[in-house]
Image (cartoon, grey):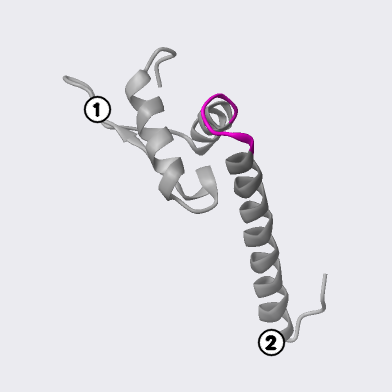
Amino acid sequence: MLPGDKHVRVCLQALMEVVESGSKNIEVAVMRPNAKLEVLPEEQIEAVCKVLLFEVFPLSTRLLYYVHAACAWQVIEAEKAAAAEAAGEPAK
């Protein structure tokens, strides 16, 4: 992504308003004239989302964003533990 690419920022800002758990569930591809399709790396999307989170969204939205991400992480860990238990593997 180019440093001054405002279109990608606006796209990510709109996606952050409707996507659960923020940048982990967002994939962005940029198509420019006379260039190949560019899929943005997850790290780059996450970095832009973090900047947007503090520049654009109010504190209440930021808190909900982090609480939701933490809850999603706990659900994933519980599912992993249940799958390991069902497979007869020792708990980690």
Q: Residue at x 44, y 43 (%)?
A: 17
Q: Between residues 49 and 86, which one lies in front from this camera angle?
A: 49
Confirm or deny contact between disc 1 and disc 2 (CB under 8 A).
no
Q: Is residue 57 magenta?
A: yes
Screen quadrant of the C terminus: bottom right
Q: Where does residue 58 sit, x and y in percent of width and height?
A: 58, 34
Residue 33: percent from left, percent from top: 17, 20
Q: Which residue is mark 2?
A: 86
* Residue 38 located left or right of residue 44: left
Is 81 included in the stretch rendered in magenta?
no
Q: Which mark is residue 36?
A: 1
* Closest to the observer, 83 or 59: 59
Name which residue type carries label 2: Ala
Q: Of the residues under marks 1 and 2, which one precedes in the sequence?
A: 1
The range drawn in magenta is 54-59
Residue 9 vs 27, above or below: the answer is: above
